[in-house]
Structures are given as structure tokens and as C-alpha cells.
Image: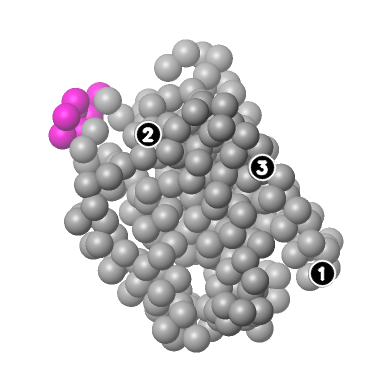
């Protein structure tokens, strides 16, 4: 990996962690798009998973008093089923397919939520969220907008939403690391994994960005939070779909 690529990745880590610290999503999509442009899909998944796991884990720690542990436990049941199902799927996305998935994922915020009636506080919905979100997160690298659909109707504060989403996503990224690392190590050995120093340098940057983002989150009201989140992820989706179209 070149020094320029490493600098770009580290700078993007700081910025995207700040964004995710505010909205609990969006930053991961941007980071994945940048990584795919610089390294292979497998390498991007592993780097992204490591950075996002620590960023989400730290964000969950900062907001630990707001985590809904019941929702998380039900989510874990669905996530286990989701990762088990992936072992029966032989397809993995290349860069073109990944940009398309990354571009379409943010558009999920425009689904008619009043007709979906999804609520993460309901037992069956939380389990299904774990199943669907874990599957998409493992294949596309991100699944924040899909997870958000389950929180829109939930009677939770913005702090509870971000905290609970963060702890579920920390788990999802941990699983993603294992899913993509095993074939890489099997085929080329441990030396084929991303350099340890890159991850070590990215962790404090993700923590700094998350801390700064949390300060902005505390100054926002719930209405402004949802409005800005929807506009941001839509803009990201449009850009990535344009990128996918350019590749084709």
C-alpha cells in the first residue's frame, strides 16, 4: 500500500467517524467507497470492518447508558441466522457490483416507512433486522440505511437510536472481518491482510471523530437529526450510483 493511499484512508477515517458520530450512519458508506477505489474488495472489507468496529464500539461506549440491550440480544439471534445463510451463497461482489450496492443502500431511506410498520422494539422485527442487516453488511460492507428502517417508528430518543445502532453495527463489522479474512489468509497467508500499523493509526482517529460527532449530536433536536440524516444519505447514494454507472 502506498503512502498516499494510507494518508487518504486515515483522513477519510477521521471525517467519516465524525459524520457517523452525529448520525450513526452515512460515514461508513463514504469510507467503503473510498477504500474500494484504493484497494481490492476483500482488503476494503477487512480495513473497513476493523475501523468501523472500533468506531461503532467506541460510540456505543460513549452512549452506553442509552443502549437497549433487549433489542441487541434479539438482533444477535437474527445476525447468527444471517451469517449462517451466507455460507450457502457463493456470490461475492466485485467493484462494480459493490458500488451499485453502496449506491442503492442509502435509497432505502425513501421507502414508505408508514407502510412497512417496522419497529426494532418488537421481538420479531429485531430478529429479522439482525438477519437482513448482517447479510447486507457482510456482502456490501454497510447496511446503516436498512437498519435505520427498523428504528424510524421505534419510541426511542436520538441517543438511544445511535447507541443501539452502534452496538449492533460493532458486532456486524466484527463478523464481516472474519467472513472476508478467512479466504484471504487461506489463499495467501497472514501477510496478505492489511498492515497492522494502518489499523492502529486509524483507531484513535475514529475515536476522535466519534467524540467530536457526539458533541454535535447533543446540540441537535430529534427533528433536525432525522431531516439532515435523510438528505445526507440520499446525496451519498446518488454520487455512488453515478460512480457505478461510470464503471459500467
- Magenta residues span 185-191
Report whether 41 appears left or right of 120.
left
Mark 3 to mark 2: distance in Å?
A: 20 Å
Residue, disc 3: 238
Residue for point 51% across, 14% down: 3
Residue, disc 1: 223
Which element type, helix, strand or loop, lies under badge 2? loop
Along the line of sight, the residue nearer the viewer: 167 or 151: 151
- Residue 49 visible from this viewpoint: yes
- Discs 1/2, front: 2
Residue for point 78% across, 56% down: 228
Residue, disc 2: 94
Report whether 79 appears left or right of 19.
left
Which element type, helix, strand or loop, lies under badge 1? helix
- Residue 16 horizontal/vertical position (percent): 63, 41
In the picture, the quarter occupied by the N terminus is top left
Q: Quadrant of residue 98?
A: top left
- Tell me, what colour scheme is on the image? one colour
Along the line of sight, the residue nearer the viewer: 225 or 118: 118
- Residue 205 visible from this viewpoint: no
Q: Is residue 188 magenta?
A: yes
Q: Is residue 226 magenta?
A: no
Amino acid at each position: 500500500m502506498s503512502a498516499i493511499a494510507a494518508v487518504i484512508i486515515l483522513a477519510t477515517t477521521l471525517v467519516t467517524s465524525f459524520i457517523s458520530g452525529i448520525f450513526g450512519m452515512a460515514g461508513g458508506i463514504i469510507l467503503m467507497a473510498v477504500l474500494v477505489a484504493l484497494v481490492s474488495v476483500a482488503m476494503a472489507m477487512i480495513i473497513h470492518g476493523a475501523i468501523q468496529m472500533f468506531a461503532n464500539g467506541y460510540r456505543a461506549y460513549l452512549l452506553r447508558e442509552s443502549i437497549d440491550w433487549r433489542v441487541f440480544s434479539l438482533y444477535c439471534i437474527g445476525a447468527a441466522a444471517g451469517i449462517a445463510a451466507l455460507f450457502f451463497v457463493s456470490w461475492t461482489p466485485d467493484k462494480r457490483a459493490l458500488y451499485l450496492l453502496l449506491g442503492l443502500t442509502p435509497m432505502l431511506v425513501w421507502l414508505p416507512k408508514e407502510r412497512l410498520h417496522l419497529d426494532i422494539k418488537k421481538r420479531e422485527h429485531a430478529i429479522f433486522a439482525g438477519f437482513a442487516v448482517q447479510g447486507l453488511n457482510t456482502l456490501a460492507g454497510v447496511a446503516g440505511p436498512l437498519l435505520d428502517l427498523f428504528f424510524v417508528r421505534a419510541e426511542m430518543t436520538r441517543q438511544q437510536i445511535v447507541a443501539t445502532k452502534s452496538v449492533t453495527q460493532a458486532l456486524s463489522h466484527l463478523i464481516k472481518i472474519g467472513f472476508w479474512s478467512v479466504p484471504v489468509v487461506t489463499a495467501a497467508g497472514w501477510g496478505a491482510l492489511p498492515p497492522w500499523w494502518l489499523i492502529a493509526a486509524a483507531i484513535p482517529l475514529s475515536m476522535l471523530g466519534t467524540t467530536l460527532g457526539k458533541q454535535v449530536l447533543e446540540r441537535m433536536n430529534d427533528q433536525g437529526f432525522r431531516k439532515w440524516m435523510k438528505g445526507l444519505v440520499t446525496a451519498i447514494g446518488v454520487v455512488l450510483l453515478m460512480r457505478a454507472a461510470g464503471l459500467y
